[in-house]
Image (cartoon, rainbow, N blue to C red):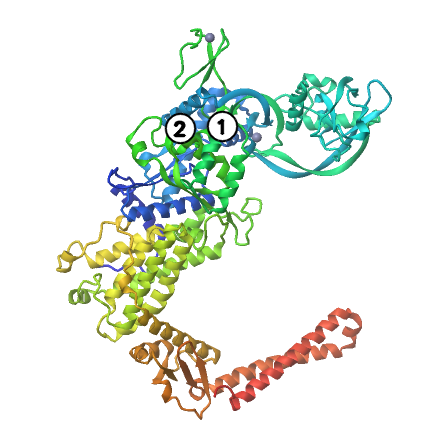
Amino acid sequence: MSEIPKAYEPGKTEKKLYDFWLKQGYFTPKIDPDKKPFVIIMPPPNVTGELHLGHALTATLEDIMVRWHRMKGEPSLWLPGTDHAGIATQVVIEQQLAKQRQTKKEIGREKFEKLIWEWADKSREDIRCQHQLLGASCDWTREKFTLDEGPSKAVRTAFVCLYNKGLIYRGERMINWCPRCQTALSDLEVVHKDVMGHLYYVLYPLTESEGFVTVATTRPETFLGDTAVAVNPEDERYKNLVGKSVTLPVIDKEIPIIADDVVAASFGTGALKITPAHDSTDFEIAQKHGLPLVNIMNPDATMNENTGPYQGLERFACRDRVLVDLKDRNLLEKIEPYSHSIGHCYRCQTMVEPRVSLQWFVQTQPLAKAAIGAVKDGRIKIIPERFSKIYFDWMENIKDWNISRQLWWGHRIPVWYCQECGKLTVSVDAPLVCTHCGSKQIIQDPDVLDTWFSSALWTHSTLGWPEETDDFRYFYPGSVMGTGYDILFFWVARMIMMGLEDTGEIPFHTVYLNGLIRDENGEKMSKLRGNVINPAEAISKYGVDALRFALTTGTSPGNDINLGTDKLESSRNFANKLWNATRFILQSLNEEVLEAQAIPILLEQPQRIEDQWINSQLNRLIKDVVELMQDFQFGEAEQEIHDFVWSKFCDWYIEIAKIRLRGQLTPSPLSFLVNTLEKSLRLLHPFMPFITEELWQSLKMKLLPPDVTRGRSDTMTMSASIVIAPYPLADERSFAPEAERVLDSVIEIVRSIRNARTQYNVRPTRWIEARVYADELLSGLITQANIMETLAKVRPLTILGRQKREPTNDKALVLVLKEVEVVLPLAGMVDRLAEEQRLAKESDEIKGRIAQIEDRLRDNAFLSKAPSQVIEREKQKLATLEDKLTRLHKELTQLDSPSAGS
Ligand SMILES: [Zn+2]
Ligand SMILES: [Zn+2]
């Protein structure tokens, strides 16, 4: 039988294995009413383009959970899908059109939608491939897209239900408007950035008398939409002006001075200009005082017909003109620098314009109340817990949600307006006539819904809701919702609200929030910084398993992850270490051994201490790992498996086993090698699915070759794939504290002797003498003498009871360890000549450098030209070198008569 290749080449195995898994249908769970399913609905990536590391992280964590539950025998569903991502995708296509000097209006809605569909279909295909590349064990037979018929019907149904309950309404409200996208945005879709701007002090002349009221504003051009000036009623400066009026310059418009206690007398001049159509605070004040709204802008943020001479100017050009005009009239008192926060569109970064507009809203407070309850009473658990507080804060102060978007890409609002009676028909299926008057003259609302509206239904719309499908009955509610903490409000909170509203049940039991990925210095990854790691590139360079391992190991929920090439490299090294260990074990399992041995994978009770030790350590590991996984500490579980495999198994047990195999000593360690390897592979499978399957299959091939019938195959079975093999269970009867105590001591002794050898520059091939003095561990350590001899390169090795310890006359190094003392006679250890030569060589070098500096400091040309700091630095260098030379000489004399030891 051919052996496995010498080096692990991930590229050669990954695709082959994934195809094998797909073909076997492992990722498609069967509905089994006797078993509780494990369900994750994948956060659908946007069809805007390539997956980034954040997607890879979420996908890896979810795959870890799903693979683990699948191995535990639960029907495990991971339902994949993609999001049409309304505004984000539309912006991408608009930018592509712009490159060809076209706009969406020029090509028309139909053609534009066709273009987006082509893009989306291609994107979905890419996203599917990228997930498969990552090893994601999704059920592709159930894949969904937010614009599929099922999820679309769910969207219309949810809208109609909310509307009928009075929880969706249409109204004129202050909204955030993106002038570039020309759509309304919800509050969450606005990114606030601190911008350095100015505070302009503008004089408004009083109408009936001499004098002015000064207002301070960051946006002087909005004076065109002012409908009042407001002051605090307690403000002495303005008491006699309340009820009077000012006249707006340039457009000569009279507006009243009103009093309202929301005005802070301390801000600016204490007089606040009120622009109700373009500021949300002003809007509220205007509502209270019955002030008119004057909209001064077109949808593209140019000035409209209400702005007199400024009509047609772009908003910032208008500001410049306004400032000139005010200056000309001596109405600009002063300008101060001023830093303030300005909202930007989260998709195109354009400065948003607060604007009063007729839009559709969800009244969220009643929905939020139920959603708060579900987390408060523990039906839904948020991991890490600290995010619960953030969740409550937001939910308790939630505002109505603007859900209509003036876009072309998305779910059309299921509302039809009657041209005859003017009433609305709100319906899941497109109506033929107005339900109020029967007129055929009905027109559907041209707007689409916020993309997050369909995302909010994702947990149930993907399973067939509103139909009572088998999938919906069996798989809803889901188990875990895993996603980045950055979309807790955008998405998670809304899923909880809508899940409860639509189905009466929570949509999932656990919210698992992962952190964001930063570079190795903790900086945010961005194209501008040039520190972005592309997942596809990382995969082709290091392999999928290494990428998955680097992304998740040693991390904890909710904390950001620093990732650099170092971590990727060490993850690849780990994969290689595992590969090499398996290769060694497979090579040791030659035909002769297999014929002669009992079934290696079936454990006999370990007789030897080191076998008891590895078995005990393995079972302790399994116990820890399972507990950590149950606690969602996947990064920690992975770290423990890594440490066990790397150190205890590969660095110690396999090295010990090699000594025994070389000496053909009985009992053979082979069954323990095989058992530990096989269980380690299963433990590691959810984290590193490809290499574990490849190695596990090779092991299976060796133990149970399909073409050979041996006695042993009657009593042992291995499943067709590690994917469906059971996750290991700990056997606490294997815990062996005494054996662990002995082996801990063996490892400590070997390590300390190795350190001493390095410290004293003992050649690796040289044998040195060692004496070990112990009490309780004496008999145990004696069984390990052969191992310690080989691993520490000590001979003769004497292991004695402490009472036998005699004062030594010769110079010796004494290592005082946890339970034993190790005595290393120096005479045999240090190659005195070599050490003398090394020290002498080093002191010669130093003498040379000292001479150079002394020459320099005697050179008058140097001394006269060089700055005093340079001379000072040279003198310091000299002092340091002289000190080192003294210490080297001391070492040399000590070699002649060593003083270390007892
Ligand atoms: Zn925008
Ligand atoms: Zn009608």
Query: In x, y percent, where is residue 573?
Result: 40, 59
Q: In this view, does 382 lie above or below 344?
A: below
> Which residue is at a point 61% across and 22% down the rendered structure image?
356
Mark-to-mark CA distance, 2 and 1:
18 Å
- Tell me: 341 left or right of 419: right
Q: On residue 502, which mark appears?
A: 2
Task: Name the element at disc 2.
Answer: helix
Figure quadrant of residue 190 = top right
Give the vertical position of 607 relative to 458 (above or below).
Answer: below
Where residue 611 sits, quadrant-wise, is bottom left
Residue in the image at 31% along x and 72% along y: 738
Q: Point out residue 840 in the picture as x, y percentages from the top left corner.
A: 56, 84
Q: Is residue 4 visible?
A: no
Residue 803 vertical position relative to residue 781 in the rendered view, above or below = below
Q: Nearer the viewer, residue 822 or 700?
A: 822
Q: What residue type is labelled 2?
A: Asp
Q: Residue at x 62, y 24 (%)?
A: 355
Name the element at disc 1: loop
Residue 533 pos. (x, y %):
49, 48
Of the pair 828 and 832, the residue shown nearer to us: 828
Residue 121's x, y, as percent?
40, 31
Above or below 428: residue 494: below
Indicate the quadrant where residue 571 lies: bottom left
| Mark 2 Cβ inside 8 Å of ligand 2 | no
Q: Check residue 440 in the rendering and tell me which mark sits there, or answer none.
A: none
Q: How many labels does the image show?
A: 2
7 left or right of 852? Answer: left
* Picture quarter with the N terminus: bottom left
Q: Which mark is residue 450?
A: 1
Residue in the foreground of this view, choosing between 887 and 357: 357
Q: Does the residue labelled 1 lie within 8 Å of ligand 1?
A: no
